[in-house]
Image (cartoon, rainbow, N blue to C red):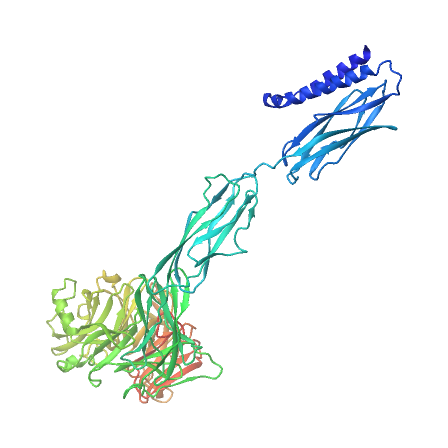
Amino acid sequence: MPHLDAKRRDFGGFRKSVKVSSETAMGRRISSYLKLASLVVALFATALAGCGGGSKPGFTLEVAPSTISVVPGGPAQSLTVGASPVNGFTGSVSVALSSLPTGVTATPSTLTLTAGTLQQISITASSSATSGSSSITLTGTSGALSAPATAALTVGAPPPIVTSATLSTSTFDFGNNLLNNTVSQTVTVVTNTGRSPLTMSPVLTGDPSFAIVAGQSCGASLAPSATCDMIVSYDPTVGTATPVTQNTVLNMGFANVAAATPQTVAISGTSASLAAGKVTATNNPQVALYTMTLPFPGSMMVNFGTTTAYGLKTWSQTTDTGGCEVSIFVAGMQATTAYHMAATVQLSNGITATDADHTFTTGQLSKGEGSLGLRGTTAPGMTPQPGLEMLNPLTSVAVSDLSGKPLWFYAEPGSQALNILDGVKMLPNGDLLMVIGPTSSLPLNGPAPADAYIEIREVNLAGDTVREITVNDLNAELLAATCAECQVTLQTFHHDIEPLPNGHWLVLSNALMSLSSTSTPPLTNLPAQTVLGDVIVDLDENLQPVWAWNEFNHMDPNRHPYLFPDWTHTNALLYSPDDGNILVSIRHQNWVVKVNYANGTGNGSILWHLGEGGDFTLQGGTDPTDWEYAQHEPNFFSTNTTGVFSLGLMDNGDDRIFPTGVTCGTSGAPPCLYSTVPVFKIDESAKTATLTFHQMVPPAQYNFFGGNTEQLANGNVEYDLCGTNNGSYVFEVTQEANPQTVWSMTSGFNLYRAFRIPSLYPGVQW
């Protein structure tokens, strides 16, 4: 039976086609194999039944299994289709599938069979296929012949989509916040670490001050390997001045992760209200005290002005402890004027808040205050260095704006006729340091009167004394001191004091010594007499003497070009930060000397002398005329302070020397008495002093005592002509060969020093 043998060969080939390569797959195929075997037997039996009959040839369509099940997104399932010949049918049959539900596909969807053979169709359901039951209709055609077959189809429920996820943190602290202040932060980052989309529905449970920021936070789904931020806002609406901790819990609501997956974040924040500040008067009628209690660590500064636009500001004061008061003196206001002021608070974490506006009316200046007759003028087309002018009219300290309006004043409460107040310096803490005492030459005429104040004093902007040391106190400390050259009795404090970066003070004082030809140091070619020389004492942070420099130990009393026995009349100290030494202006020697201080470890030797008869060669000027004479207050005009650097000073010119053969004051000769403002480029190695700026002051403005000069931030030169016949003149000029006046100020009083400050607050520019 050849036909039957063919059937068997086809069946054997089919069996080979369904063989699988794994034991697990083979187990799943056993049931289908049995069903296919039944189909083949049925086809064979049908073919036998047609043998020898008299009916027309035809075919029947068979499908196995009769029921098939697929899962959305799952593996394909196979249908086996065969055409059974009837009455010797030998044609080919075209088979087409129909009635497939949405999302279900057949591969192939059409096929052609030879009667008595089998083919397979794969049925798959996409992940979006709808679950349910239906049927698959197959129609076989061969010419005019047609035969149907059906198989039941079940689309099962989709399997659960499982992925994995992580949170960047399980806790988050907003830290400190103020009432009614909204802060938004990323409290955690969600990462989908699986291969399927992550679904979630985050919610907060706890204090209502917290809220999820919609539109900026994670949505309902997150793609595989992606991340998203969970942003939460913290806006305390209920609170007191006492900090309160508030809490909430963020639950991410992951829907398709393992049950043990962490998905909560504990969130906290601390809230407090900011109590309104207080503004009170001080002992200075032009200064107010602004006080606030900060609930958390932070800083405060005050904006102030004559309107609510303010325009001026103080510096900032900081507290590292919550619940502490912060106070700022508000200074720089005109007398008898209404001012507005409001503090701005910045917490350590960057949160800011502004206090309510306060008003404060300054008081009336007492007699003598603000009556310096100041008048400031800016030259047409010029722009002066901004800031304020600090003035030292010997018995007081005054601050004005550049037009001359008085903004701050301090006077020593004792006898202004007796006590000189000078050497004023602003400290890094905003206080002012000053020297108070009678004239430095007084000891030559006898002891100071009992009612004289002789002290170094630090005062705040309200005029309160912060700390002080009297000359008697320091003399008592010197008796017990062990430092070299500390065994000396001081007479008075005078002229200057130099605060150092390490908090020490270099104090300028003087001492009397009886000198003769047999004394140490010896005084020759003169009768024995009492000589007044100067002493520098280094006071540490506790106002204890730790170093001293006595001019009697380092200079020759037989050199006395001016006003002996007031031998040295030192009037200024200048610290050199590059090498830790000090420059000393010794007026009656016509010298500026450099002293080996070495930050308190030096032996006090004089490293060089600048001036006529000193160690330098003058360049760019006439020697000896263009050296400094009876000078005051040197200042650095360069950022470096050693090696090759620039130094400016006030050359008063009292005892100026002229070249041999030149008679000053005669026709064609220079005037005998005039002052200059020199700037020297000092080369310490080459020992040259080159004049790079040298303004000769008109003889009518000859400045016989006091004064100073400095380089401003804009490069201009400011100088003060203190001791003229008509009070004082202060100038800001361009630093060039032909200086142009930028700004000037006049006063009917002798201003011992005048200098530009950014404002009444270190580091704040007005």
Relative image position of residue 282 (x, y in whole percent): 28, 78
The quarter in which the C terminus is drawn is bottom left
The residue sitting at 74% across, 17% down in the picture is 41
> Does the rendering let one see residue 521?
no
Seen in the picture, residue 117 relative to 390 is either above or below; the reply is above
Apparent side of residue 167 relative to residue 465 in the rendered image (left or right): right
The quarter of the picture where residue 414 lies is bottom left
Q: Quadrant of the N terminus?
A: top right
Q: Nearer the viewer, residue 369 or 301?
A: 301
In the rendered picture of this protein, how many numbered marks are placed on residues? 0
Confirm whether residue 444 shows in the render: yes
| Location of residue 702 (image quadrant) | bottom left
Residue toward you, 61 or 299: 61
Q: Position of residue 690 (x, y in %)?
A: 38, 71
Taking the image as shown, residue 183 lies to the left or right of residue 479, namely right
Can you say whether 175 is above or below 137 in the image? below
Q: Residue furthest top?
A: 1
Give the image location of residue 304, x and y in percent: 39, 76
Asked whether 659 or 505 is in front, the reply is 505
Please state which of residues 600 and 43 is positioned toward the viewer in this rendering. Answer: 43
Q: Position of residue 675 (x, y in %)?
A: 34, 82
